[in-house]
Image (tube, grey):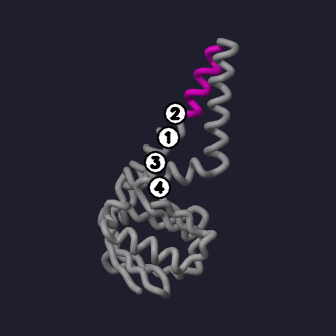
Amino acid sequence: MEMEFDVKVTVGVLYDYLLYHTYTSLSGMLGTLVGSFLIMAFLSTKYVIYLIAGIVLIVYLPGALFLRAMRQVQDTPAFKRPLHYRMTDEGISVSQGENEENQSWDSCVKAVSTGRSIILYTSKTAASIFPKKDLGEKKEALIQMISTHMPPRKVKIRF
């Protein structure tokens, strides 16, 4: 089984990945929880500082992630042009121009989905992002390929 497709990493696509990656980690969840507790503390004590601190904690992180996504897309030459992916039984090949990198299926850590993308983690912090809008009708074939080559416990993709 083999498939090929092109994806373009945009600010929206990268922001979606950063949101998922951050808010499924302990620090992202903890920041939101502390922010919520501070707002609840304001409601019971009426100390405005609690409200300000709670709003900063809850609003700051998504805003900072959006700015980071904008900066990363602008500053990364690889995001200027589409990336070409070739998925085979041996692994994943990504190319752009003359540059090509290969990854075996064994080195893939996990596969997840968000509302906008399918994300294939190749390490705890590095991932290949496949925007669903770029995949079109190949989305189901990609999910099938990932599910075939990775253990079920590593695949958390929803349709």
The residue pinned by badge 2 equals 59
Count residues near mark 3 (Cα–Cα under 10 Å), then give few for <14, some for 14-19, many for 20+: some
Q: Which residue is mark 3?
A: 68
Q: Residue 18, percent across and down?
A: 50, 52
Name the amino acid type tagged 3. Arg
Disc 4 marks which residue?
114
Q: Quadrant of residue 101?
A: bottom left
State the extent of the magenta-drawn residues as a range. Answer: 47-59
From the image, tell me which residue sits under label 1: 62
Q: Is residue 41 above or below residue 78?
A: above
Q: What residue occupies the far front of the structure in this picture? A: 159
Q: Main secondary structure of the magenta part?
A: helix
Front: mark 3 or 1: 1
Residues at discs 4 and 1 in contact (Cβ within 8 Å): no
Looking at the rendered structure, the kind of residue marked 2 is: Val
Q: Secondary structure at mark 2?
A: helix
- Mark 4 or mark 1, whichever is nearer to me: 4
Residue sitting at x 34%, y 71%: 138
